[in-house]
Structures are given as structure tokens and as C-alpha cells.
Amino acid sequence: MNRRIFLKYSMLSTVFAALSCNRSGNYSKQLTPTENRHLQRNLTILTVTPENTHSIKELRQKSVSALNLDRSVLLKIEKLMRIRLKKSGGVGLAAPQTGINRRFFLVELQNGEKETIFCIDPQLSELSQEKNDGYEGCLSVPGVGGLVSRHTSLKVQWYDTSGKLHHRKTTGFEARIFQHENDHLEGILYVDKVKGKLLPWDEVRKIRKPRKSASLQISPDSAQIRYI
């Protein structure tokens, strides 16, 4: 093989290798090796038991800004996270719950459309002095629920995947979702804030008292409760 043919073959091999990496979802220049492994596994939701909540380090790390990530990376992660959230039946999902320690999460707005928004580098402010207790459950700590005190209202700002800045004032159950998901970005799980004992999920489902600010959404005609 002469030098010209060898160089041409080498260049083609490099191109095919790059294409193969893109097809497999390898964003190594954008994400850490650990984050890449989670992405290649389609972002399975990480779960722990109440007795061993520090067993998965991704759930206990403080996440870093996501604003340095390329839009293509964010869109790929957003798509997979939306799939996971829809299958789970929850109303919120933070990036660390899927092994990506970056500051973004999904929240299902509690409006008529039940729109789910993707919030990049969110910031909470104007938290009310008033707090309410509500039962919470978490996709990463399945099988249990507990009573947590949260601010009843707040203001949140975030960026979308196009870099546009958004602001929203929120109250009640929706405000609770934002606080729960924002805690994930700080490496905090709701079980760290539970008042009293954790309850088996079946027992929580039997709770019939309507709580407007509760983080467990209970429909008036059934015991349907959704994880945050």
C-alpha cells in the first residue's frame, strides 16, 4: 500500500469512527465518561433504598452548570428524559436522577395543558415565608413517601434549549415540584427533610385528605398519586 492510499484509508477510518460515535450517543467532549455511560444506556432512572441513599454518588453530588453544553447534547438528553418521565408517571425529573450531574430538570406545570418544561440552570427566588406540609414521593426512592414542609410560593427562572430566559411565579403543588427537583441539583433527597417516619407507598395512597400544596397529587375521585 503506497503512502497516498494509506493516508486516504486513514482519513476514511477517522470519519467512520466519528459517525459511529455520534450514532451511539457519545458526547465525550461535552460530558464526563460517567455521564456518557449513562447516556448510552438511555438514561435509566437511578434508584436507592431509604436505608442507603448515599449508595449512588450521582444522586448526592452537587450538579454543575449546563450552559456550556452544546444544544445538540441538551436536546438528546431532554428527549431521553421526557421518555423516562412519561413512562414513570411522575411530574418531575432532575438530571442527576439519570446520572447526569448538570443543572436541569423537567417539571409538569399544573395548568390546564399540563405542559412539561425543560429548565436549564434554574434559579429559585422570592420564596414565601409561609410553608405547608405535604406528602412527597420520589422516582429515585420508590416504595415510600413522607411529609415534607415546603414554601407555598416562589419565583423561578430558567433557560430553554434555545438560550431564552424564562420567568414564572408558582404556588402550591407546582411550587413544591420545583423545590423538590431543585433539591436534586444540590444532591439533596426529599427523605433528608421528612418530618416523622417514611410510610409505605400503599399506606400513603390511602390518605384521602385533599392537600392543595401536597407533592403527591391525589385526584378527587380516586387514590391516584404521582411521584415527583
Image (spheres, helix red, strand yellow):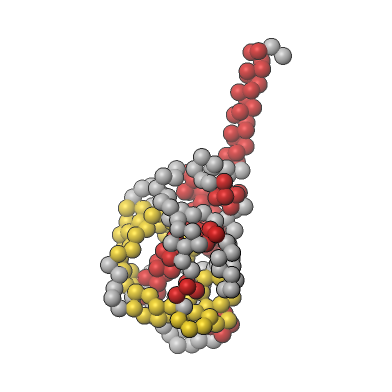
Is residue 114 in view? Answer: no
- Which residue is nearer to you in this view: 227 or 31? 31
Residue 67, horizontal then vertical, whole percent: 39, 48
Measured as percent of width and height from the top left, residue 107 is found at 43, 64
At a point 40% along the width and 78% down the height, the residue shown is: 149
Q: In the displayed structure, does residue 114 sit left or right of residue 46?
A: left
Residue 174 in picture, x, y percent from top left: 39, 71
Task: Please give the name of the residue rendered at 54% of the width and 86% of the height, measured from the top-left corner.
Answer: 206
Is residue 55 in view?
Answer: yes
In the figure, 157 relative to 74: above or below? Answer: below
- How many badges with numbers are in the image? 0
Please name whichever residue, 106 or 184, is drawn nearer the observer in this view of the structure.
184
- Between 4 and 86, the one nearer to me in the picture: 4
Q: Pick the quarter of the image with the N terminus.
A: top right
> What residue is drawn where x is 65% and y is 21%?
9
Depicted 56 relative to depicted 68: above or below: below
Which is more toward the observer, 206 or 66?
66
Q: Residue furthest right?
A: 1
Q: Is residue 216 toward the left or the right of residue 159 in the image?
A: right
Task: Kindly identify the residue that appears in the image at 43 percent across and 65 percent down.
Answer: 183
Give above or below for 11 relative to 42.
above
**Residue 203 placement (x, y as % from top left):** 56, 85
Identify whether 137 is placed above or below 11.
Answer: below
